[in-house]
Amino acid sequence: MKMKRRAPPLLELRRPIPQTWYWGAGLSFIGAFLLAWVLLTSLGLVPRIFLPSPLAVANELVRQAQSGILWQDASISLYRIFVGWLLSTLLAVPIGILMGNFHFFEGLFEPFIDLVRYMPAVAFVPLTILWLGVGDTQKFAILFIGTFFQEVLLIMDNVKTVPRELIQISSTFGLSKWEILRHVILRAALPGIWDTFRITLGWAWTYLVVAELVAASVGLGYRIMRAQRFLETETIILGILIIGAMGLITDYLFKITYKKFFRWALQTR
């Protein structure tokens, strides 16, 4: 008598599911979204000026790729994102580590950081133009403002998740304060910090249009804002999709490297 094959449990708390189900669910959702898009536009339920068809967006993609506009915009936007995020990270890491380990530095920096992080980055556009001009430095500053203040607090929290017992045990072995900080706390917090890098780089992508809002002549954000003036909706949607795709690629690069560098941390998830 044949035994019936049981379906895998899909809704168990934190229980892994087969990869076929995992990827199938994601692809099915994307497929349903695309199908709804096709139906809305092909049946004329939404005017073209508000929502162009997927074919119109695809044609715009081909046009920009063949003319070289797409590669120029994508490369300069990627450069701005990387530099702005890197500047933020180089400053956020040491400050976040100090704040997470020493209450003096937490008291010194956190009130100011908490104040500024609630200020919208777009409000700083006029000031950064006044202070830094209209070149790439101004755009780096907007990306920095949009990511640094959140990133430093996340890194502080990553450091604070290291168990106090681990620090106390390290002290009993005769390690100095700075040896504990470097060899114990930093190594234990590094997986969380790596995840913070992934999250904050995603935030930097969301601030791209703000950074390229004024006085830009090239870039994905500039192309979107220019298309808005001429009601070129297919160009707007294409720019949004390109930013999303590039952000997704960088996100998965961080996930892949996380699995490679921190295999031991995956067992605790």
Image: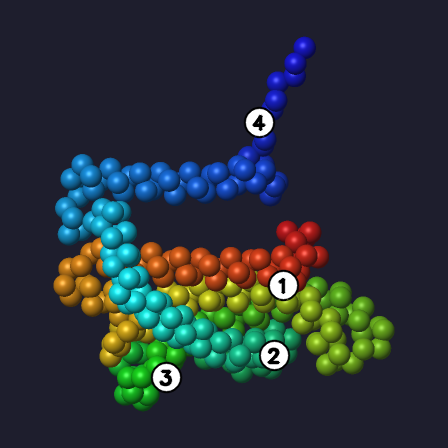
The residue at the point 57 percent across, 40 percent down is 19
Q: Are marks 1 and 2 in contact (CB under 8 Å)?
A: no
Looking at the image, is mark 2 or mark 4 earlier in the sequence? 4
Residue with the mark numbered 2: 98
Q: Which element is circle 4 on?
A: loop
Give the residue type at disc 3: Thr
Looking at the image, is mark 4 or mark 1 earlier in the sequence? 4
Q: Which is in the foreground here, disc 2 or disc 4?
A: 4
Residue with the mark numbered 3: 137
Label annotation for residue 191 = 1
Looking at the image, is mark 2 or mark 3 earlier in the sequence? 2
Q: Are marks 4 and 1 in contact (CB under 8 Å)?
A: no
Give the residue type at disc 2: Leu
Label 2 and label 3: CA atoms lie apart by 28 Å
Looking at the image, is mark 3 or mark 1 earlier in the sequence? 3
Give the residue type at disc 4: Ala
Density class for disc 4 (Cα within 10 Å; few <14, some 14-19, many ≥20) is few
Residue with the mark numbered 4: 7
